[in-house]
Structures are given as structure tokens and as C-alpha cells.
Amino acid sequence: MSRFWSDTVRNILPYVPGEQPQDKKYIKLNTNENPYPPSPKVIEAIRKEIGSDLRLYPDPEASLLKEALAGFYRVKPGEVFVGNGSDEILAFCFPAFFNPGDVITFPDITYSFYPVYAELFGIRYETTALNSDFTVDLGSFPEHADGILLANPNAPTGIAVGLNEIEVLLQRNSNKLVIVDEAYVDFGAESAVPLVKDYDNLLIVQTFSKSRALAGLRIGFAIGNRDLIEALDRVKNSFNSYTLDRVAIRAATEAVNDKEYFAEITGRIIKTREETAKRLVSLGFNVLPSRTNFLFVSHDRLSGMELYSMLKNDGILVRHFNRKGIENYLRITIGTEEEMEALVERLSCYVKSV
Ligand SMILES: *Cc1c(COP(=O)(O)O)cnc(C)c1O
């Protein structure tokens, strides 16, 4: 603490990302990274981009990437915003769409960055309880809220709501902006992108960090009607003209264009997820229905903390949230088949010994 700290810095409780230990080699199933490398075409594009052109600023509009995304999602380039990870875009949403004193609402168990952004930008927030089966009650958001922020599928539960339910939510809340964080949508959930043309209160945020295996490059995007995108552009251009560097723009464009590779690795992760879920159920674990690249699981005879510690001891990192209501759950990222084999083997040992 220094006497030069602002009140904001003094009071804020920053988000704590999952461990990225640099000391020993773990089987890393704790931050929902993709177990597979980026597309070979992405690596090749990065190699080509590294040269004397790095002395030049990147295209501040990242038009190449916006056009690729617009083509892939069948929207117009003007309906696409790109940013330095979807975290940055989610952060921009707060000053772009809300005033101090406005209320934004989201479930109490969801991505824990949302309340941090609200604090940072001085926007009030109210949370609503999940149902007892961990599904989101879409009717529970307070009427007086100015905006709704929904992770779909939700994190860390992995549970998704369908497109029809999103459409009903948009109709019932036509006077509120609904931001849908689809970080995990490519692992078997339904995207709300097709609704953008009919609903001016819908903004979708997605990331290249999970399904496109590019967490290290920091790329996210948003899709919504032009006027919403313009608001994000205004915030970005009042903050940093060049949020995406030349290498990221080129690499992300190749990632979008390599549809076959994308389909292959997401398909593989979904298959591994389903097999792992079955095996964990047979070991007595309670496994929530996941449409993501992770499983949210608990066991009656072993606490979340115990399981987390035993696994860490054995070289396997998973995520444990020390939070009321989910303290007995572990969030386990889907790794390669071999990694999940090692995980199941360890867990079956622990279960047999209690
Ligand atoms: C991983 C994640 C993000 C952030 O992704 P980045 O693009 O890496 O910043 C956003 N929302 C949710 C729910 C996530 O799990």
C-alpha cells in the first residue's frame, strides 16, 4: 500500500487466475486451455509475420480478422469487434454500456471476473442464485437491472441453456442489454449468433483461448448489431488503438480459416469429455452435464479441497474454488486421452482408499 494509491486500487479485490506454475511439470487441467497445439497453419502464419514489418504498427481495425470472422459466422464485418482476449472485451462492455449507478446482473456462481470489472468501473451489480441443480434461472434476473451478463455455457458448472431460452430472455428483457459470454460454446452448446440480426439488445462475446487453442496469443471477439460494436470501438479507441498486434491478427485469421482443424480438435475434446464423464460416474462422482472443455465434479466421501491437494501432490493440477456452494467441486479441464487416463487412475485410487 502506498499513499499514492487511488480509492479504486485500495478497495478492489483483483481476479485471481488459475495457477500457472513455472517450477515443475504438472498435468495441467486447471485453466481450461486446449490440450492440442494451434493449427499448423497458424504456426506457419506466425513464422511469416515475424520479420521487418514488426517495426510498423498493426492495422488498428484488424480488418483482415474481422472479415474472416464475419465470413465464418455469416454476419457483416461491421457487426464484429476484436480485442486482446475476451476478458478485455468484457471489461470494455462496462464503460461502453453502463453508467455509474446502473445495475448489471449475473448469476452468483459464474465467471468470477464479472464482479471485478463492475468494481473497477464503478457499476453496481446484483447476483441471482442458481437453481439447486446448478442450472441458471433465466427468470430470476431483477426487473430493475439495466443489463444482464450470462456465461453460456456457464462457468464453472459447464451447464448450457438452449437457443430458445436465450430468445425468450431477449424478448422478456428487450429494454436491457443482454451480454452472452460464449467462451465455451464450441464444445457442444448452441451459439446465439443467429439471433443478432433480430435483437438489438444482444451482444455475444467469444474467445480464441479455448476452442482455438490460442490462449497464449490473447484474442477475443464480439458480435452484435453495428451500434453496439461502435460503442466498443469508441471505448477501445479512447484507450489503446492497437489492442491486437500484427502476429495475433494474422494468426487468428488463419485459425478461423482452418475449419477442418478446428472441427477435429473440438470433436476430439468432446469425445474425451464424454468418456471421462462416464468413468468418473462409475467411480461414484457426481458429474454435472457439461457442454464445455471441462467437467465440474464432486464426490460424497472426499471433499473438494482433499481431492485438489491429493491430485496436486501427484502432479495433476485442477481448479478448486473455495466458495460456498461449490467448495466440494473440482473443475477439471479436458486434456488429452492420456492425461485423462492418468487422472482417472489417480482418482480411482483415492476413491478405493476411503
Ligand atoms: C476463459 C474465459 C474467458 C476469457 O478468455 P480470454 O479470451 O482468454 O480472455 C472469458 N469468459 C469465460 C467464461 C472464460 O472461461
Image: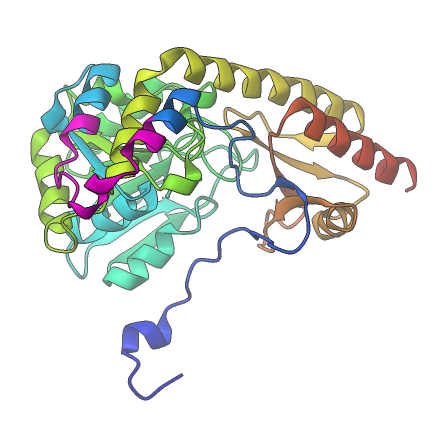
The x, y position of residue 6, in whole percent, is 27, 78
Q: Which residue is the extreme one toward the top? A: 260
Between 295 and 316, the residue placed more toward the observer is: 316
Residue 303 belongs to the span the image colors magenta: no
Q: Quadrant of the N terminus?
A: bottom left
The x, y position of residue 299, in whole percent, is 75, 38
Looking at the picture, does residue 126 appear above or below residue 49?
A: below
**Image-quadrant location for residue 277:** top right
Please give the count of numbered marks on the rendered protein.
0
The x, y position of residue 263, in whole percent, is 44, 13
Q: Is residue 179 visible?
A: no
Q: Which residue is the extreme one toward the front? A: 52
Q: Is residue 3 visible?
A: yes
* Ligand 1 - quadrant of the structure image: top left
Residue 57 belongs to the span the image colors magenta: yes
**Residue under the point 52% across and 14% down:** 267
Q: Quadrant of the C terminus?
A: top right
The x, y position of residue 11, in whole percent, is 36, 74
**Residue under the point 62% across and 41% down:** 28
Q: Which residue is the extreme one toward the right? A: 353
**Residue under the point 22% across and 21% down:** 68
Between 31 and 117, the residue placed more toward the observer is: 31
**Residue under the point 84% across and 32% down:** 348
Image coloring type = rainbow
The stretch of residues the image draws in magenta is 45-65
**Image-quadrant location for residue 221:** top left
**Image-quadrant location for residue 315:** top right
